[in-house]
Image (cartoon, helix red, strand yellow):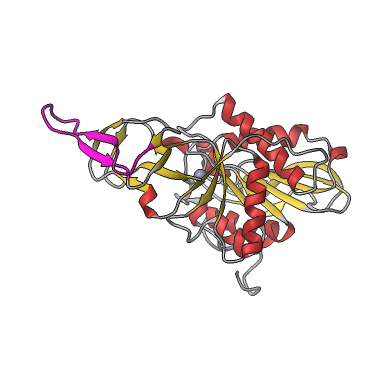
Amino acid sequence: MQSESLRPSPVTPTIDLDQQGVQHGFLRLPYSRDDSAWGSVMIPIAVLRNGDGPTALLTGGNHGDEYEGPIALCDLARTLDINTITGTVIIVPAMNYPAFQAGTRTSPIDKGNMNRSYPGKPDGTVTQKIADYFTRELLPRADVVIDFHSGGKTLDFVPFAAAHILPDKAQETKGFDAVKAFSAPWSMRMLEIDAVGMYDTTVEEMGKIFVTTELGGGGTARAETVAIAKRGAANFLRFSGILSGQIEHRETRWLDMPSGDCFSFAEDTGLIETMIDLGDPVRDGQLIARIYPIGRTGVAPAEIRAKLTGILAARHFPGLVKPGDCVAVIGTVD
Ligand SMILES: [Zn+2]
């Protein structure tokens, strides 16, 4: 957590976050630039409040090229009936709005990866200033938090909701219960390969119940994965005691990521041949992808083999890879 001696956030909401009723507005962040001397970044926000009760914070567009979250949350902000909720729902469909506007993972302003910029800085870059506003102003209001991700332009996932293994086992159990309520086809007990600077880490260290997702990818969204996001958002609000009605349970299968052996990275540049499809079973040692050098024929492709038995949970997208690219993620099945 940041000290109280930090300067105030430069972000100003255009709506009163504590007011009763439905409000649509912006988080206005001053950003002086060539085409707008006293201009601002305007991040859309909706706040729906009906009486006293828990507060849920729902976000998408942490990465700007992931679309199920923003679609489901724009729909939710417009259609959620205030009379069916008790408490407060805060919706920010595109947390890194400059990245979302540009259709890129990171911000075109400062190249900031929002999910590596937490807890943020009030006097940092645009991305760090947005992160700081969430850390110091929005997250303290929230009891439960969900952040929608998908694979973006360079990964494609089987659709899953996830929570993390945590030191506080009571908090961990609530997180997995929330994942179960979300009811995606897959549910993941997630291991992060790079947890420093993540929104997830900041939220969890504040003791909140936190759910994240990976719902597809390839820089687009499918009808099936958007439906999962919409149902999951409503189920999450029901689980939290904010939205009335029964949780719409669907069958889900649990995945684990027991170690770094889940991840396979390319060591070569080339054309990737995926040998199995998303969701398919994989055995330890099985050939899962080949990388062909593209400059000549007659050269054997590099081989990528599974280091665990499970299913293919994620794969590289699209067809060309370079050294260091994540080419496959294996999840082990319960
Ligand atoms: Zn993401």
Q: Residue at x 71, y 61 (%)?
A: 140
Confirm whether residue 14 shows in the render: yes
User: As displayed, is residue 294 above or below residue 162?
Assistant: above
Confirm whether residue 10 shows in the render: no
Residue 55 appears left or right of 303: right
User: As displayed, is residue 222 above or below residue 203?
Assistant: above
Q: Quadrant of the N terminus?
A: bottom right
User: As displayed, is residue 65 above or below residue 39?
Assistant: above
Residue 240, given in percent of the width and then of the height, sits at 75, 49
Task: Kindly indicate the quadrant of the structure image that contains residue 274.
Answer: top left
Task: Kindly indicate the quadrant of the structure image that contains residue 288.
Answer: top left
Residue 94 appears left or right of 331: right
The verdict on residue 167 being magenta is no
Which stretch is magenta? Answer: 282-306
Q: Residue furthest left?
A: 298
Residue 256, given in percent of the width and then of the height, sits at 49, 49
Which sits in the foreground, 145 or 159? Answer: 159
Residue 269 appears left or right of 31: left
